[in-house]
Image (cartoon, rainbow, N blue to C red):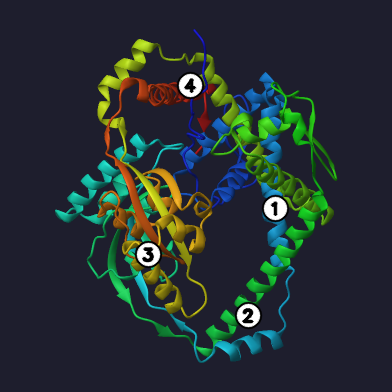
Amino acid sequence: MGRKMYRIAACLLLPIGLPAAAEQASEVVASYRSSVTAEELAQWRKLNEERVPIDRENAIQNLILTRSMAEEALRLGLDRQPEMRLQLELNEAKLATSALRRDVFQSTQITDEQAEAGYQRIKDTYTQPRRVRLYNLFKRYPLDATDADRQVVLTEMEQLRKRLLAGEDFGELAEKESDSQTRFRKGLLGNVPAGTFPPQIDRVAMAMKPGEISEILYGTDGLTILYCERILDKVTRTAEDLRQIARNLIQNRTSKQAWAELQGSLKAAIAPTYHWQVLEADAPDPHATLVEYSEGRLTVADAERLLRTGRRPLELPRVSRQQLRQRIEKYLLGKMSLLEAERRGLDQDEELTMRREWKRLETLADSTRIHLVQRELEAPTDSEIREFFEAHREDFTRPTVYDLSVIRLPLEGDNERPTYQQGERIVHQIRNSEVSFEEAARSHSQHPSAQADGHLGRISRWVLPHRFGFNVLRAILTMKTGEVSDLVAEGDSLWVLRLDGVEESRPMTFDEARATAENKLGTERARILEAQAVDDWMARLGIEIRP
């Protein structure tokens, strides 16, 4: 039976977050085929202190699971695989970049004179803004979610909202059902000022009243329901607070500028030269040099591995040169940041060294877990895929698809009225046949679709709010085919929309759903195998935890 890679959970480890226990550093707190000291446990907890607290026993078990699986990865030689070497390199670059950014911030010095000047500028205007005390219940879309996956999440959220409106306690439901870390605080987000969320969510949140439950709100990663507990009116700050705020504002602004300048100089130092012609062959040579830069070169094979990393793996034949360039230059910037951190001696920092080693162990442990699963995992047969599809038909639905044309007018500056007036004239002229939609789009639209007479193409209902916002979606839901909308304000833009056609939502056929069904079934099996592999692994270790 052939094997296929299915998505495996990044980590089954429980999150750690308690402060380090007050134990002697040399004390052994647990043993398996090796031992764990109090110092190692304290390090593990410190590095995970922002996660959710769990008890000492689980912390020790998670540490041992990570370390023992990392040891197995080294025994199997998984660390020598090119993909693993790349992932370890990316980890190093990410940690070094964070350390470098902290160093830039900490080295930014603000004089008392600068701070006082800043205080004088804000002392008459700066107040504690009006805030809304909010709770959230969040459901995350699966990684690489299909439209059918999103529909399942929406249906679930609709049922949860009905339960809330029927009187169920928001905090208890969030604690049980939410995918957000706030579930451990019964959904509490805190006291939220305006501007915290994306504009479409921010408008809803800031308009809520005490006791109100929001509609379902669409986000990039999932769906949210908000609950407003109370409103906190704005409060004027003390002079001492304002002086500290002024100092912080100046330091943040100055350090951001210094960081941007450093990033700019590092980008310039890359000096990449691309050899795009090597990709034009029917079967590009994996050893051919695709890009040369100041510190070395990348081959076609290097680029392919780079595209496969991250949350959204890509395939070389399917990416544009712009996408490939962005991925490569992000990677090279990380390498240059690592070199700069080493030049500054940041690699000698004890905490960075500790974080780097634990991150290395976690990554190696992940590779062992994936290895154990892939060793046992077999691709589903056609009959198994069809059986899964029949048992979960409600999960396989083609969403409504809209064929759209658009005109975008950017809102710029403090005086937006001229732009509104321009938009109103355009709508009037189109509706009165004084100008066609296509002509208006070519003449006025500040959107890439202007080159295609404003025609955007077919877009599913799920994609619309992410690309254009909820106001655009709401407008389209009320329109008929051929209709031109009124002006729609969304964020920093005004939109004129034309609905060219609609394909209504419908159940998917097996052929349409086959690839998604196979991936879902394979992923489900992989998760079961992963849980079994971890349980079996822990049972064989013979862990002894000392009081």
119 and 311: which is toward the camera: 311
For marks 4 and 2, the one nearer the N-term is 2
The type of residue carrying mark 4 is Ala
In the rendered structure, the answer to whether residue 229 lies left or right of residue 430 reads left
Residue 152, horizontal then vertical, whole percent = 30, 38
Q: For the residues marked 4 and 1, what is the alpha-carbon distance in whole angstroms?
A: 35 Å
Q: For the residues marked 3 and 4, what is the alpha-carbon distance in whole angstroms?
A: 69 Å
Residue 444, horizontal then vertical, whole percent = 49, 64
Between disc 4 and disc 2, the foreground one is 2
Q: Secondary structure at mark 4?
A: helix
266 and 182: which is toward the camera: 266
The type of residue carrying mark 3 is Glu
Count residues near mark 2 (Cα–Cα under 10 Å), then give few for <14, some for 14-19, many for 20+.
many
The type of residue carrying mark 2 is Arg
Kindly identify which residue carries mark 2. Answer: 247
* Residue 532 numbered mark, or none: none
Kindly identify which residue carries mark 3. Answer: 434
Between disc 3 and disc 4, the foreground one is 3
The type of residue carrying mark 1 is Thr
Q: Residue at x 65, y 89 (%)?
A: 117
Kindly identify which residue carries mark 4. Answer: 533
Kindly identify which residue carries mark 1. Answer: 97
For marks 1 and 3, the one nearer the N-term is 1
Q: Are marks 2 and 1 in contact (CB under 8 Å)?
A: no
Q: Secondary structure at mark 2?
A: helix
Quarter location, residue 479: bottom left
Q: Secondary structure at mark 1?
A: helix
Q: Residue at x 66, y 35 (%)?
A: 306
